């Protein structure tokens, strides 16, 4: 009788309990990511105002990061790998000290010019809190569900794209499988984090592509009087192939770079110091910090209003042909040797500038190609499908959804199954 009663309670009450907990989890994560994001923007602005003061110190701050993790955050330096290890049942703990360690080390990485992202911090904040709260919730699958909900909340709070955040959290852990048992809690946590972050003043990046071109719109490029414009669809498919190769190539080369750096320089202090000196020199040589930090300066160039709209050549909009490859290489070097942050925002910049560069060659308007690259290279590097489609729609307008669907599907098919995350593969029997 007692067993039947417990089964009844688990069946009918576990989901409402998890949804309620997810609401409070989302509110807490939204507040933390808003604070983290605003401080990150402030330190990035300080670096951009005085690059010659800060960028030369990158190697020294790298040493401080390594020593700080050794003394105060032992084990947590693995970051996203630890989160995925717990999600896959290979590990059992995500210590709370991960949150201050990854936040502070990411602020320092950006202040001194490291070419890194920020999503890793947000996802780790959400996953850490979700995992630790789940220990107090004695319902079925609480650990897995709240970890996924926390990941969704972290991404949504930082980027304010809740649909993409939900999709990413559900699909990123296991390729070919959606963690639908966490769908409602993840949705509640993501939308709550998004609203809390918005109310606390963290700004969202968004672009209305159609406003750049009063004489056309994205839908008009896809359809004509005969239905789908097959020639334009083929152009989008070609872009998808290119974006998939770039995204998958980034993930593969990042993995190889981590192994190479660890083998050639096994001492983490020497590794981050020696490579940090090289990165800072390159950052200063290439236009005194053009490729430092998140890469939002490069993204802004791709959508600079009438300047971008009036041209079909990237150079006329201030975008260099080498922008995407230099950001690509410097981001891999920064992350591979142990600097903190993430890869997603640099991937947005790599995708946007690469899209702008190939736009004229493929015959797609520059801002549209940049927008498609922004999302699809991210999808190719994370081996996700729905997340990049939604992030494209949420940032560039839902009327662009068909274009993002075509490009991201092809990019997903052409990325070689690579990912910047420690994903598991679905084994079909």
Image (tube, rainbow, N blue to C red):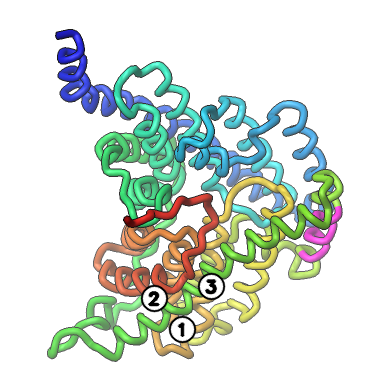
Q: CA distance from mark 3 to mark 2?
A: 18 Å
Q: How many marks?
A: 3
Residue picked out by circle 2: 368
Closer-to-camera residue (11/427): 427
Mark 1 vs mark 2: which is more N-terminal? 1
> Dot 2, crowdedness within 10 Å: few (<14), some or many (≥20)?
many
Which mark is drawn over residue 246? 3
**Mark toward the viewer: 3 or 2:** 3
Query: Which mark sits nearer the N-terminus, 3 or 2?
Result: 3
- The image shows residue 52 at horizontal and vertical percentages of 81, 56
Query: Measured from the top left, where is residue 39 in percent x and y?
Result: 59, 39
Relative to 222, 237 lies left or right = right
Circle 1 sits on which residue? 359
Q: Around disc 1, counting alpha carbons within 10 Å, would you say few (fewer than 14), some (14 to 19), or many (20 or more)? A: many
Give the distance between the C-alpha atoms of the residues marked 1 and 3, in whole angstroms: 15 Å
Report how far apart the C-alphas of labels 1 and 2 lie in the structure: 8 Å
Give the quarter of the image for residue 239. Answer: bottom left
Magenta segment, prevailing SS (helix, strand or loop) = helix
Name the secondary structure under disc 2: helix
User: Dividing the picture into quarters, in which one does residue 234 lie?
Assistant: bottom left
Marks 1/3 in contact by CB < 8 Å: the verdict is no
Q: Which residues are magenta?
A: 274-282
Query: SS class of the residue under badge 3?
Result: helix
Q: Dividing the image into 4 quarters, which one contains the C terminus?
A: bottom left
Measuring 25% from the left and 37% from the top, which residue is drawn there?
184
Rate crowding at label 3 as few (under 14), some (14 to 19) or many (20 or more) other CA atoms within 10 Å: many
Confirm or deny contact between disc 1 and disc 2 (CB under 8 A): yes
């Amino acid at each position: 009788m007692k067993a039947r009663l417990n089964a009844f309670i688990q069946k009918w009450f576990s989901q409402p309990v998890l949804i309620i907990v997810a609401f409070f989890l989302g509110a807490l994560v939204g507040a933390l990511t808003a604070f983290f994001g605003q401080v990150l923007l402030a330190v990035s602005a300080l670096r951009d105002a005085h690059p010659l003061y800060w960028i030369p110190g990158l190697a020294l701050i790298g040493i401080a990061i390594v020593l700080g993790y050794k003394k105060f955050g032992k084990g947590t330096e693995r970051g996203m790998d630890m989160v995925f290890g717990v999600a896959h049942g290979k590990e059992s703990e995500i210590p709370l000290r991960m949150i201050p360690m990854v936040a502070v080390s990411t602020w320092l990485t950006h202040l001194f010019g490291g070419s890194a992202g920020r999503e890793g911090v947000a996802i780790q904040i959400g996953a850490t809190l979700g995992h630790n709260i789940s220990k107090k919730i004695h319902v079925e699958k609480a650990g897995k569900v709240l970890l996924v909900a926390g990941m969704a909340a972290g991404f949504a709070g930082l980027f304010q794209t809740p649909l993409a955040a939900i999709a990413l959290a559900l699909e990123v852990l296991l390729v070919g499988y959606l963690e639908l048992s966490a769908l409602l809690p993840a949705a509640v946590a993501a939308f709550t984090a998004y609203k809390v972050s918005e109310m606390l003043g963290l700004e969202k990046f968004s672009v209305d592509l159609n406003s750049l071109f009063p004489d056309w719109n994205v839908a008009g490029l896809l359809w004509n009087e005969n239905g789908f414009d097959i020639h334009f669809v083929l152009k989008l498919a070609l872009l998808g192939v290119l974006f998939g190769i770039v995204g998958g190539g980034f993930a593969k080369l990042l993995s190889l770079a981590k192994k190479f750096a660890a083998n050639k320089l096994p001492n983490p202090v020497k590794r981050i110091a020696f490579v940090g000196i090289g990165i800072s020199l390159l950052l200063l040589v290439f236009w005194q910090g053009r490729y430092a930090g998140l890469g939002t300066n490069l993204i802004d160039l791709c959508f600079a209003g009438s300047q971008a709209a009036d041209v079909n050549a990237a150079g006329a909009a201030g975008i260099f042909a080498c922008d995407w490859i230099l950001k690509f290489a410097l981001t891999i070097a920064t992350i591979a040797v142990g600097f903190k942050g993430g890869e997603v925002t640099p991937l947005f910049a790599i995708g946007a500038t690469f899209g702008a560069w190939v736009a004229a060659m493929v015959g797609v308007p520059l801002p549209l190609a940049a927008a498609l690259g922004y999302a699809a290279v991210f999808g190719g590097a994370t081996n996700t499908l729905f997340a990049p489609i939604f992030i494209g729609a949420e940032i560039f307008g839902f009327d662009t959804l068909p274009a993002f669907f075509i490009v991201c599907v092809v990019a997903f098919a052409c990325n070689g199954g690579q990912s910047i995350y420690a994903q598991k593969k679905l084994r079909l029997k």
